[in-house]
Image (spheres, rainbow, N blue to C red):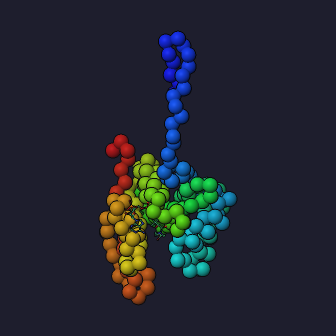
């Protein structure tokens, strides 16, 4: 801001110190084909995926970018001088406006900086703006995933269903739900 005195001399205010939080420097954007290997690297570093699951992820990404714009899925990332997170959300088949967040992961070096929350809110806002109704997330019921369940609960998700023994013997699946609302609704 420039301040003018009565004599029209331009006075510059003292240089303001600028403080940035980590998340102010982040840029959430749609992923591009050039991001594929970096996205896989973030997923591998953040989630204890089996090699076949990583292969499946790679296939999904490749199909998405090979679809010539016909894919309804969204792949988003947070680019902060390199990719630090990934989100993959797709519509549930044979529903109207119900979506599933199949993957959200923040690189372990960048967790607990509000990035996961910000990415999740971005996904919700994007879907709400399109008039979509519901976002589901599914996660494991085991003790080591308690922090993930806390993350979803703190983000406004409510536990909607538990499918016992879903992932493996003794490993339940918990389905969380959040209703999406258009900004003007
Ligand atoms: C779950 C995950 C995406 C959260 O991302 P994040 O950027 O670390 O989370 P945020 O910093 O935005 O946290 C938001 C809130 O969630 C909760 N939370 C997140 N991580 C937590 C942890 N490790 N322990 C306890 N609470 C946690 C906190 O309440 C936090 O708010 P606070 O920091 O103000 O207390 C991230 O931990 C991750 O990538 N985990 C591995 C992949 C995974 O399991 N993904 C989910 C299943 S696909």
Q: Is residue 67 above or below residue 47?
A: above
From the viewer's side, name the closer residue of 158 and 18.
Answer: 18
Q: Residue 139 location, x and y as percent?
A: 41, 73
Dividing the picture into quarters, in which one does residue 53 lie? Answer: bottom right
Q: Position of residue 27 (x, y in %)?
A: 55, 51
The front one of 148 and 100 is 148
Q: Please state if 27 lies on the left or on the right of 98 as rendered.
A: right
Residue drawn at the location 51% of the way across and 36% of the way down: 16
Q: Is residue 15 above or below residue 123?
A: above
The residue at 49%/64% (across/down) is 111
Considering every residue shown, the one lying at the far right of the view is: 34
Question: Ligand 1 is located in which of the four quadrants?
Answer: bottom left
Q: Is residue 77 visible?
A: yes
- Furthest toward the front, the residue is 14
In percent of the image, x 33 and y 59: which residue is there?
A: 156
Judging depth in this view, the residue of 28 and 81 nearest the camera is 81
The image shows residue 179 at horizontal and vertical percentages of 34, 57
């Amino acid at each position: 801001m420039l301040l003018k005195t009565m004599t029209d001399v331009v006075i510059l205010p003292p240089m303001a110190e600028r403080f940035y939080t980590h998340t102010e420097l982040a840029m959430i954007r749609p992923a591009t084909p050039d991001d594929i290997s970096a996205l896989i690297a973030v997923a591998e570093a953040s989630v204890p995926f089996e090699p076949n699951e990583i292969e499946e992820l790679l296939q999904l990404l490749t199909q998405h970018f090979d679809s010539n714009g016909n894919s309804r899925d969204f792949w988003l990332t947070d680019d902060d001088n390199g990719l630090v997170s990934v989100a993959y959300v797709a519509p549930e088949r044979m529903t109207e406006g119900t979506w599933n967040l199949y993957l959200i992961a923040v690189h372990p070096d960048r967790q607990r900086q509000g990035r996961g929350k910000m990415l999740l809110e971005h996904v919700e806002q994007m879907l709400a703006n399109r008039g979509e109704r519901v976002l589901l997330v599914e996660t494991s019921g085991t003790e080591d995933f308690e922090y993930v369940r806390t993350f979803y609960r703190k983000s406004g998700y409510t536990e909607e269903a538990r499918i016992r023994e879903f992932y493996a013997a003794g490993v339940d699946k918990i389905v969380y739900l959040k209703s999406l609302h258009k900004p003007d609704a």
